[in-house]
Image: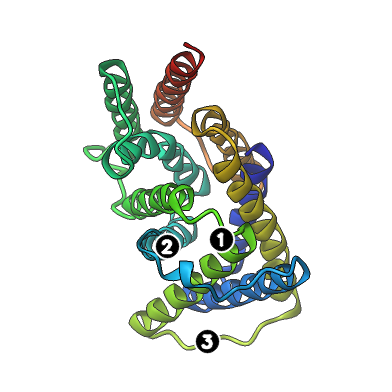
Amino acid sequence: MIASMAAFAIEDAFLKTVTKHLPVGQVLMMFGAGGLCVFALMARRARVTIFQAQVLTKSMLFRAVFEFFGRLFYVLAIALTPMSSATAILQSAPLFVVLGARIFLREKVDAKTWLAILAGLLGVMIILRPSAEDFSSMSLLAVIGTLGFVGRDLFSRAAPPTLTKEVLGFYGFTTMVIAGACFAVWDGKPFVALQAQQFLMLSAALISGVFGYTALMIAMRTGSIAAVTPYRYSRLLFGISIGVTVFGEQLDAPMLLGCAVVIGAGLFIGWQSQRRTAS
């Protein structure tokens, strides 16, 4: 999970840079096409069949829908808002995972966990500061993207076990191509010819993204959710460090406070889950 979060932070940095020169729809389509080709080759090497009947199960269809919104809106968030802010909002994902597990997977949630979830959502509101003068409605893009990733992770857990990480990766990146095409039609911006530097950045983002996606699928499908989910918070360290050092972004007290509240709530939920498992 830690390796996955580091890789995704690096992927975000390259995508944020390349979207300054290329339309978001084009970036998503090219990035997704590269990813699905990589996972198709991985599946062939592992002798795994890409086209299976289980791909059309309800859980996989829901997973595709959440992947669509998660990828599209989070890439828009890192393109249009500070990377450190988008990364901070993304840290609420573990809270929503627990909430989604209660709604979709019928897992039990006790009163203390509900209070922790509410506290974490309060932390998100502190980060967003909807009443502050510097609030940007663009920050809501990261919120929608986060909810998309939460649904994707939950339904990755619920996906048929016969579908390997290669298959999940192939269809995940295929969904990204579809999301990019839909946004390109809506956006209406013409595609731009790639320069060598932009090609290298997209390639680096692709390598990081494929590695991160593979590591995430292994963590979510083979590890205990309670055990691996708290390690998602390592992405905050990676993302904010890149935002400050590479993009010159500034941190303020409300953002740091909100991050502390969100992380504290998530770690408390993880600790509660481990206690219940041990007992």
* Structural distance between the alpha carbons of marks 1 and 2: 10 Å
Crowd tier of the residue under label 3, counting other residues whose Cα lies within 10 Å: few below 14, some 14–19, many 20 or above:
few
Residue 20 % position (x, y): 55, 68
Secondary structure found at label 2: helix
Q: Residues within 10 Å of mark 2 (few under 14, many from 20)?
A: many
> Residue 43, position in %: x, y?
69, 69
Q: Is residue 204 above or below residue 119?
A: below
Disc 1: CA contacts within 10 A as few (<14), some (14-19) or many (>=20): some
Residue 150 seen in render? yes
> How far, Cα to Cα, is label 1 from label 3?
35 Å
Distance in Å between CA atoms under marks 3 and 2: 31 Å
The quadrant in which residue 77 appears is bottom left
Residue 163, numbered circle: 1
The reply to whether discs 1 and 2 touch (Cβ–Cβ < 8 Å) is yes
Q: Which residue is mark 2?
A: 60
Q: Amino acid at mark 1?
A: Leu
Which residue matches tag 3?
191
Q: In terms of image quadrants, where is residue 94?
A: top left
Q: Which labelled disc corresponds to residue 7? A: none
Q: Is residue 63 above or below residue 18?
A: above
Write the residue at 27% across / 23% down: 114
Measured as percent of width and height from the top left, residue 130 is found at 24, 40
Helix, strand or loop at label 1? It is loop
Residue type highlighted by circle 2: Met
Location of residue 169 in the rendering, given as x and y in whole percent from the top left corner = 59, 63
Q: Residue at x 67, y 62 (%)?
A: 205
Answer whether labels 1 and 3 touch (C-beta < 8 Å): no
Q: Is residue 247 visible?
A: no
Q: How many marks?
A: 3
